Image: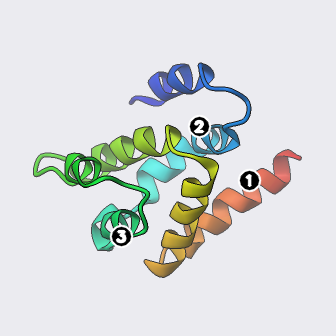
Amino acid sequence: MLHGTITHFVSGFSVAFSHAKTITENFEYLTRNLDATNGLLCRLHQDGVLELDEMQSVSGEQNRGYVQNEKLLFILVRKTEEQFNTFLDALDTTRQSYIREHISSNQQSRR
């Protein structure tokens, strides 16, 4: 739905934001497979990746599933590489390590 939008949005970022490229390349997979409601948002807030208002924006009452994940990805694109790595660690602690593995295998195959 918004994949073209995020591609356009990310294209304005410096190449230094390699995590933005990773998010863009895996956008459809991430929006379909992330489960932000199982503690991921709270973990990201606790670890300093998400501000309280960002967490509330993503978890808003009308935001469910795909839309929630899109909002989270739009926020993560603007974060630092270190914060993105914290997001990857949070996937492990919220039993979503299969998503991290998918992203890693896609990065390896593109090299």
Q: Mark 3 to mark 1: distance in Å? A: 28 Å
Q: Nearer the viewer, residue 101 or 80?
A: 80
The residue shown at (74%, 53%) is 106
Q: Earlier in the sequence, mark 3 or mark 2?
A: 2
The residue at the far right in this view is 111
Q: Residue 84 carries which label?
A: none
Coloring applied to the structure: rainbow
Image spot of residue 72 (x, y percent):
38, 48
Q: Identify which amino acid the numbered label 3 is placed on.
A: Gln
Report which residue position mark 2 lands on.
Answer: 24
Q: Residue 46 carries which label?
A: 3
Q: Which of 111 and 17 is in front in this view?
A: 17
Instruction: Report the mark closest to the observer, 1 or 2.
Output: 2
Report which residue position mark 1 lands on.
Answer: 106
Q: Which of 33 and 36 is in front in this view?
A: 36
The residue carrying pointer 1 sits among few (fewer than 14), some (14 to 19) or many (20 or more) residues within 10 Å by Cα, namely some
Q: Mark 1 to mark 2: distance in Å? A: 12 Å
Q: In this view, does 63 lie to the left or right of 108?
A: left
Element at badge 2? Answer: helix
Instruction: Report the mark closest to the observer, 3 or 2.
Output: 3
The quadrant in which the N terminus is found is: top left
The residue shown at (42%, 38%) is 74
Image spot of residue 64 (x, y percent):
22, 52
The residue shown at (29%, 43%) is 67
Element at badge 3? Answer: helix
Instruction: Report the mark closest to the observer, 3 or 1.
Output: 3
